[in-house]
Image (cartoon, coloured by chain):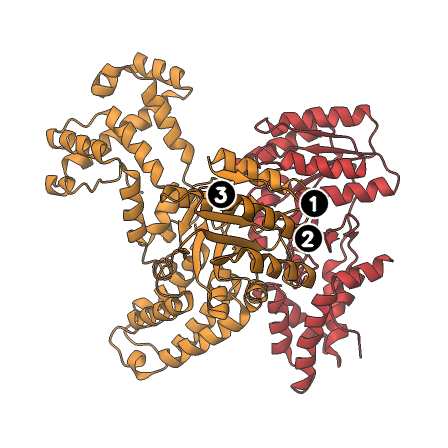
Chain colours: A red, B orange
Amino acid sequence: MSIMTKISKGLSKTREKMAQAFQAVFERGPSRDYELLEEFLLLADVGPGAAAAIVARVKEKNCPDLIPALKEELMDILNLDSEDKPVKIFVGINGSGKTTSVGKLCHRYVTEGKKVFVIGTDTFRAAADMQLEEWCRRTGAPCLLGKPGSDPGSVLFDGLNSAAARNADYILCDTAGRLHSNKNLMQELEKIIRVSERVRPGDAEVLLTLDAATGQNALQQMETFAQAVKPAGIILTKLDGSAKGGVAIALAAKYQVPIKYIGVGEGSEDLLPFSADIYVNSLLPENE
Amino acid sequence: MVFSGLSQRLQGIIGKLRGRGRLSETDVKDALKEIKLALLEADVNYKVVKEFIANLQQRCMGSEILNSLTPGQQVIKIVRDELTSLLGTSASSLNFAKGKSVFMLAGLQGSGKTTTTVKLARMLKAKGKKPVVISLDTYRPAAVDQLEIAAVNAQIDSYRPGGFKPIELAKNALAWTEKSEHDCLLFDTAGRMHLDEALMEELLQIKALIQPVEIILVLDAMTGQDAVNIAQGFAERGLADSVILTKLDSDTRGGAALSVRAVTGKPIKYIGVGEKAEQLEQFHPDRMASQILGMGDVLTLIEKAEAAFDLEQAARLQEKLRKQQFTLQDFREQLQQFKNIGSLEQIAGMLPGGAKLGKMQFDEREIARFDAIIASMTPAERLSPDIISGSRRKRIAAGSGTTVQQVNKLLKQFAMTQKMMKQLDPKMAKKGRLPFPFKI
């Protein structure tokens, strides 16, 4: 299955809903119904601030057709440069899909013939190490998993050194889920990043996993995580539901953080590189 | 704190109206517009917001407001009424069956089902029930282990049935529970999207087999507009009788809570407020409405205080208060009890106007530091802090890993508390209502 069809399939539910919403816009009369456009962005979790800004810019364009103008606007926001660094540290709140994303990305790299090393620093949640171990068993990637209760920073230190000894191309590091409002856990995360900077200066990027169903709280999450560890990219997970992940658009607009990957299902292959073009086109109905 | 962001916004908006002698139609309209924005930022579903604002508008534009002498107060009352009717009025607990009560927890991936299953079991056990937790999650790697380990940590019984498919597991588990002494069976299920027809069908089959007295939908409180679709997806298929909201210890504005009840009519029964097994609380919609409007949730605070304070200790303290012998040792005990009620932020959120304390960061470690400092004192020093000289301060600081300044701070705080205690009416102390050790 090509990437395009995969994403389209993953987002099909989303698109159906969007198409219905747009249908409503057109049925209700002139296609310049900006209020409905805003409503539609709000329902996609883009948030009142960003939605108002986007609608204002679409208005400025004064385009006869709403959808192409909106597409253009969204593409402008979402097309951001992103770097690829060998050490990837996955952070995010509980249940956002960090471990699963590590597993899927590991699968992707292994399939591409890359040497991957996985480090599990979630020493808090029950059975977190077992969950990651299972992913590594499936993909055959070597790993170092911290024992329950051990210090995440020292696990990372050991892991980075073992990975270097094995000449790994990519090092994927899972961390424990933490609410951004928990000060102590955020400090723990800062320490993890300090360790990585000491062992591999400039080689690591922090990836924030974000559940597509998350609402405006994602802005607070980003704000706090940005202060602590400066995420270089977002992994938007669970896009195979009815959630549209629109808050990622608000994040991209406000923080210029690119979405790097999207999760569209439960299978090992269901983590795809993000493409603004495909995402926006899957989200909105075809031009008529 | 739950809803604190939302309450701050609403309090600000309403505060502007409060002092006004007369309200014009534009005043009300502007306020409504701001309320609408605040609700949307809090992730309340767009359609719910629209209806809510329409209702408010209708009531606020009536003559009862515009001609009232205290129009601001009237608006607050109306907003409160409407909020309460959105959230539901009374708290509800779990339903139980006559024989063994079967509960099933369902929800999306990562919403917190497994953690909640253990929390719920722990709560049932504390109420004298005999719960057992059983995982039917054969999909996510190590999900079964997670439940088992979490159960062991919380001293809850768990059972691991044989089999490969969830329905098989359920069958085997039922056969086992026939003979076991447990009266509450809690089934944890795999996370699933409400759009996944195959998995939803599987859930229906499990339901038909285990016949739960209640299916509890576990929902992440940080969910945005989609919360309504998710809840409806489960409720429409008869796969949600009640809701537990999780991760409310984050700074989410919790709009999902407002929407879900309004759209599905399913009550929110409990809320998860932390990672620990005991951090599950009953949801009180009426109190929540007050809290959102900054009227505080003193009832919950009193209940928590009653649960946390040791009666015997309280009696002893009362005696000491009467004799004015309140020592550092007592101060330490009191701090400990204070900590048992909840985090300082949670407590502040429950006090009227507490949300105004806003982003002020309470340092939990401060209490731990005080504890360490007092622990480094000799019994004589604890009894009479006056003898603590400069060199003693140095020793105490070194012993507790703090600085002399911090020791001074504690002594000052203690002196203040002692003064506060002396001013107390002894009659009040007799009722067992303890004052807080320091002002927040």
Give the CA distance from mark 1 to mark 2: 9 Å
Callout 1: chain: A
Which kind of residue does numbered mark 2 sit on?
Thr
Element on which disc 2 rests: strand
How many numbered markers are drawn? 3
- Could you tell me if residue B235 is visible in this image? yes
- Closer to us: B166 or A204: B166
Labels 3 and 2 share a subunit: no
Q: Which residue is pictured at 61% across the width and 63% down the height?
A: A45
In the figure, is residue A101 to the left or right of B421? right
Number of other residues with Cα within 10 Å of mark 2, as a class: few under 14, some 14 to 19, many 20 or more: many
Q: Which mark is residue A237?
A: 2
Q: Residue at x 64, y 78 (%)?
A: A34
> Does residue A77 sit above or below A113 in this rendering?
below
Q: Of the residues under marks 1 and 2, which one precedes in the sequence?
A: 1
Q: Chain of mark 2?
A: A
Q: Is residue B378 above or below residue A243?
A: above
Picture quadrant where residue B58 is located? bottom left
Q: Residues within 10 Å of mark 1 (few under 14, many from 20)?
A: many
Mark 3–mark 2 Cα distance, whole angstroms, equals 42 Å
Q: Establish if B440 lies above or below B240.
A: above
Q: Gap between marks 3 and 1, in whole Å?
A: 37 Å
Q: Is residue B114 visible?
A: no
Q: Which label was assigned to residue A100?
A: 1
Q: Are marks 1 and 2 in contact (CB under 8 Å)?
A: yes
Question: Which residue, given by chain and number where applicable, does mark 3 sit on?
Answer: B179
Q: Which of the chains bears the disc numbered 3?
A: B
- Label 1's element? helix
Q: Are marks 1 and 2 on the same chain?
A: yes
